[in-house]
Image (spheres, grey):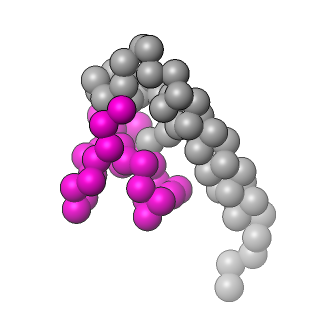
């Protein structure tokens, strides 16, 4: 798996989110392993990186859903 350490990571051509594993982009990262495969960043045999992306997707989805129910300050 290639990690993108540029100052501003490239955007996913499918969903528009940032293609990075950096925590700084949590909530705006492309976390679909299929998108990473389509971009040529992951190979179909990269099972561990795909599993990590899937787990981040679940965590970020939970974070987004829990923040939607909170009133704005």
53 left or right of 29 in image: right
Percent coordinates x, y for residue 69 in the rendering: 77, 63
Quadrant location, the C terminus: bottom right
60 left or right of 10 in image: right
Quadrant location, the N terminus: top left
Residue at the image position 28 percent from the left and 47 percent from the top = 4
Would you say residue 39 sits in the magenta stretch? no
Asked if residue 5 is positioned above or below residue 1 in the image, the reply reads below
72 left or right of 51 in image: right
Which of the pair 73/26 is nearer the observer? 26
Percent coordinates x, y for residue 10 in the rendering: 25, 46
Asked if residue 49 is positioned above or below residue 24 in the image, the reply reads above
Percent coordinates x, y for residue 8 in the rendering: 24, 58
Residue at the image position 42 percent from the left and 48 percent from the top = 21
- How many numbered circles does the render carry? 0
Residue at the image position 32 percent from the left and 44 percent from the top = 3
Q: Which residues are magenta?
A: 1-29
Which of the pair 41/38 is nearer the observer? 41
User: In the current view of this chain or complex, which residue is farthest to the top?
Assistant: 44
Would you say residue 7 sits in the magenta stretch? yes
Residue at the image position 47 percent from the left and 59 percent from the top = 23
Percent coordinates x, y for residue 57 in the rendering: 59, 41
């Amino acid at each position: 798996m290639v990690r993108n350490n540029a100052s501003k990571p490239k955007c996913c051509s499918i969903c528009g989110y940032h293609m990075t594993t950096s925590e700084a982009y949590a909530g705006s990262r492309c976390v679909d392993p299929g998108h990473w495969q389509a971009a040529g960043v992951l190979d179909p045999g990269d099972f561990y990186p795909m599993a990590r992306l899937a787990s981040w997707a679940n965590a970020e989805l939970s974070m987004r859903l829990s923040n939607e129910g909170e009133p704005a300050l």
